Image (cartoon, rainbow, N blue to C red):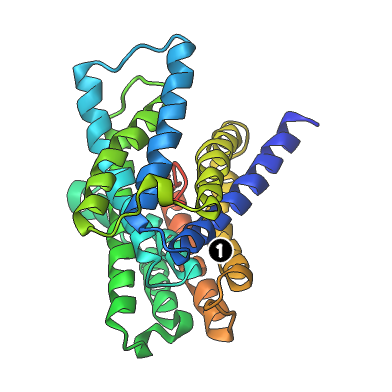
Amino acid sequence: MTTKQKAYAGLGLTSIIWGTTWVASKYGIKQGMLAFELSAIRNGLGGLSLIVFFLIKGQKLPTFKEFKWLLGMSILLFVIANGFSTYALKEIPSGLAALIAALYPLSVVIIEKVRYNNTKITSLTFQGMLLGIIGIVFYENLAVHNSVGYFMGVVVSLIAMLSWSFGTIFIARNKMNMNPYYATGWQMFLSCFFLGAFASASGKSIPIQEITFTIWMVIAYLIVASSIVAFAAFIYTMKHLPPAIASLYAYINPIVATIVGAYIIEDEKLSLPIFIGSFVTLTGVYLVNRSMKKQHQEIIPITDADGM
């Protein structure tokens, strides 16, 4: 198998695994696991595994300056983005959560425009943003949902997506000379303390010894497949394929999450509004990316929006 073929295989692997990650998290919550506790254990064990591996390989402990940077990234990318998006799965379908996460490029454009004034909101950009929002509203006829919980799930997902956007912009503008895998391990590990505190404060966390075998299998999948295998495949893909192709996973994730969720999660069904809403939103994301490419500032997701 050639390097290019391996890169395309990595793209397929990333797309499928990160799409099913949303469903796995939803399934764990349906089995009675608290969302923040699920995220805490996943990030804690996954992050610790990466840290130990790289320490054995000779990596040094972070300096105080690096630690502050890692802590900030941990809060933005894993406490808020990952933790909140997992929490939202309690109320909304996994496909919708993945679709909201895919709006990431739209928010990056807005943040870059407002904060740094280095992007132009062209007619194509505006059309893409409008379609992105319309698709989310149309998904499962969101406008007619009367459930407060459902609405809050959407709001929390949007907060998570915005936090991911702020985090990726901050990384791009404040880079640290650290191995990205090693840095991610620290960010994941640090987040588990905050997420664990949230879970404990709720008074609904499950004692470790009472976590079922099924939930441990979900956690194992999230750690091994999503946080390690898919992330490694994504980095490999980014190195050996053009960014526009490597970022295609962001369009595939919501589709995978929607289809797989319909077969595994009892109350998630496929419908015409779901497919239309997904298509409209992903078309909007594509148009925004295209408009940025014309400005030579194409918006490319840097890590999973399993995402988040």
Which residue is painted at 22% across and 36% down in the image? 72
Check the image and report above or below for 149 versus 6: below
| Relative image position of residue 46 (x, y in whole percent) | 45, 35
| Relative image position of residue 43 (x, y in whole percent) | 39, 40
Residue 155 visible somewhere in the drawing:
yes
Q: Which is nearer the eye, 94 or 245?
A: 94
Question: Relative to 94, is 225 on the left or the right?
Answer: right
Quarter residue 235 falls in: top right
Q: Which is nearer the eye, 167 or 296?
A: 167
Which residue is painted at 41% across and 32% down in the image? 47
Which residue is painted at 35% across and 11% down in the image? 60
Q: Which is nearer the eye, 148 or 19?
A: 148
Question: Relative to 194, is 53 on the left or the right?
Answer: right
Q: Pointer 1: what residue?
A: 257
Check the image and report above or below for 90 versus 57: below
Which residue is painted at 60% across and 73% down in the image? 262
Q: Secondary structure at mark 1?
A: helix
Quarter residue 146 falls in: bottom left
| Relative image position of residue 284 (x, y in whole percent) | 46, 68
Q: Which is nearer the eye, 70 or 268?
A: 268
Q: Where the N terminus falls, by quadrant?
A: top right
Q: Amino acid at mark 1?
A: Ala
Number of other residues with Cα within 10 Å of mark 1, as a class: few under 14, some 14 to 19, many 20 or more: many
Picture mark count: 1
